[in-house]
Image (spheres, helix red, strand yellow):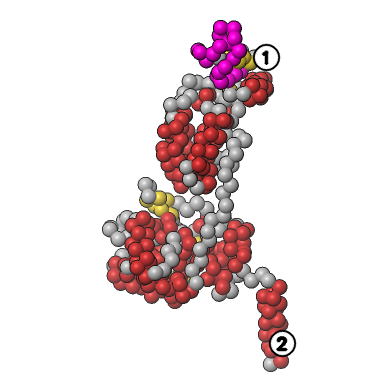
């Protein structure tokens, strides 16, 4: 047996009586930390894993990057990490603070799936085989691959921080084989379908769906929209804030998010109706249904729409898919990509092109037709 590694045996193993090992207790690897004055131990199912960990641990000790782990459970480590992330003291791999939406999804995954399974387990005793078996079981239970990915993400972050603090030598999330996440369905309503979907929902909800469909605002931007942000006289909507269900109004994720979006005639009538019926002004939330200071509940809004669309025999659409529809309509209308980037609130035009480039004219025939039309127009102008 290699130095620093020993075969473990269960209480009933024959090896304890001098016989042949008949248990699967695994292997223990250890290194000695002079700084802490104690051994750092880990157990593994296979000898190769024990050897690999010990080699990594010896390197980490030599660099001063490994210390004896505190005897904390995953639940305790998660609470500490989450508090730091919420406060902005713990940042992501890019050094930026975590977005509220990311922390919300992390919290849900930990609460529903990870902590019931591993919450009481010490952080130092969680190994890659444990997490691989966990991920495999989630897939076998029918969970969506993207849900499994999101479930593992907070674990990666927790172990990455423990690794950077010298509390671990190896991140057990490294090397996990997770199911591939395929592209999501991209739903785009046609002009006729968009009009039918809006007409089918309750009258009080139509301005929200129309603004999503014909102005492309994100859900949080719709919730945060104030009466004073809609400038009917100049035909623009000023997007200034987002919305978070716990904190209410929040700053937008980027400077590009603050923008002006044109109000087409098809949307203007819905907004004028909303102003006339609600009587809101100033900082009142334009789409508030309970009080002017609050905003609409997306879940309830969607349920009302789903019932209406099912009755009308229409395929449902989400608020985010309405945003896709807005982009597709603008492209079909001939709006140039740079203007579309501004209207969508994308920080970089590559985001716009990557997401919606396939909708833009691009075939050889289309390109030739566009060039011919342009040259024909120039010739006709020159003849006059």
Q: Is residue 183 above or below residue 17?
A: below
- Report the front residue among 166 and 46: 46
Residue drawn where x is 70% and y is 81% of the image = 372
| Residue 128: quarter of image | top right
The residue at the point 68 percent across, 88 percent down is: 381
Question: Is residue 63 covered in magenta?
Answer: no
- Magenta region includes residue 18: yes
Q: Position of residue 243 (x, y in %)?
A: 41, 53
Q: Which residue is mark 2?
A: 379
Under circle 1, the secondary element is loop
N-terminal label among 1 and 2: 1
The answer to whether mark 1 and mark 2 are in CB contact below 8 A is: no
Tell me, for residue 93, which label it has, or none. Answer: none
Residue marked by disc 1? 1
Q: In the image, what residue occupies the spot 62% across and 65% down?
A: 358
Q: Is residue 356 left or right of residue 113?
A: right
Q: Quadrant of the C terminus?
A: bottom right
Image quarter (top left, top right, bottom left or bottom right) of the N terminus: top right
Is 51 situated left or right of 255 in this image? right
| The quadrant where residue 265 appears | bottom left
Instruction: Tell me the magenta residue range.
Output: 10-30
**Residue 347, image x and y in percent?**
57, 56
Q: Nearer the viewer, residue 118 or 36?
A: 118
Q: What's the magenta bit mostly, secondary-structure-wise?
A: loop
C-alpha span from label 1 to label 2: 87 Å
Could one spot residue 275 in this view of the protein?
no
Q: Residue 145: where, in percent of width, then height?
A: 53, 46
Is 101 located above or below residue 309 in the figure? above
């Amino acid at each position: 047996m290699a130095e620093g590694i020993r075969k473990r045996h269960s209480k009933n193993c024959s090896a304890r009586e001098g016989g042949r090992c008949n248990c699967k207790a695994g292997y223990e690897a250890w290194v000695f930390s002079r700084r802490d004055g104690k051994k750092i131990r880990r157990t593994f199912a296979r000898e190769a894993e024990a050897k690999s960990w010990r080699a990594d641990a010896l390197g980490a000790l030599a660099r001063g990057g490994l210390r004896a782990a505190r005897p904390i459970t995953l639940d305790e480590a998660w609470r500490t990490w989450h508090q730091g992330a919420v406060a902005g003291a713990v940042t992501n791999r890019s050094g930026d603070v975590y977005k509220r939406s990311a922390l919300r999804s992390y919290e849900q995954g930990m609460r529903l799936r990870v902590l019931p399974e591993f919450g009481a387990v010490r952080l130092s005793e969680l190994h890659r085989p444990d997490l691989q078996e966990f991920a495999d079981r989630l897939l076998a239970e029918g969970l969506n691959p993207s849900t499994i990915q999101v479930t593992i993400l907070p674990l990666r972050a927790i172990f990455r921080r423990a690794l950077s603090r010298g509390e671990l030598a190896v991140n057990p999330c490294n090397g996990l084989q997770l199911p591939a996440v395929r592209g999501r369905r991209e739903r785009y309503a046609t002009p006729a379908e968009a009009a039918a979907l809006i007409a089918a929902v309750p009258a009080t909800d139509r301005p929200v769906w129309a603004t999503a469909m014909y102005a492309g605002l994100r859900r949080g931007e719709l919730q945060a929209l104030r009466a004073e942000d809609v400038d009917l006289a100049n035909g623009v909507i000023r997007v200034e804030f987002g919305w978070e269900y716990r904190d209410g109004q929040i700053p937008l994720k980027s400077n590009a998010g603050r923008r002006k979006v044109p109000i087409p005639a098809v949307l203007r009538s819905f907004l004028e109706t909303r102003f006339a019926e609600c009587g809101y002004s100033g900082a009142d939330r334009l789409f508030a249904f309970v009080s002017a200071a609050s905003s609409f509940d997306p879940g309830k809004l969607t349920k009302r729409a789903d019932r209406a669309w099912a009755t009308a025999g229409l395929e449902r659409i989400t608020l985010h898919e309405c945003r896709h529809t807005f982009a597709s309509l603008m492209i079909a209308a001939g709006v140039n990509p740079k203007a579309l980037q501004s209207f969508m609130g994308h920080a970089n035009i590559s985001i716009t092109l990557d997401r919606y480039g396939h909708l833009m004219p691009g075939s050889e025939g289309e390109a030739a037709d566009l060039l011919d039309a342009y040259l024909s127009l120039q010739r006709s102008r020159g003849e006059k």
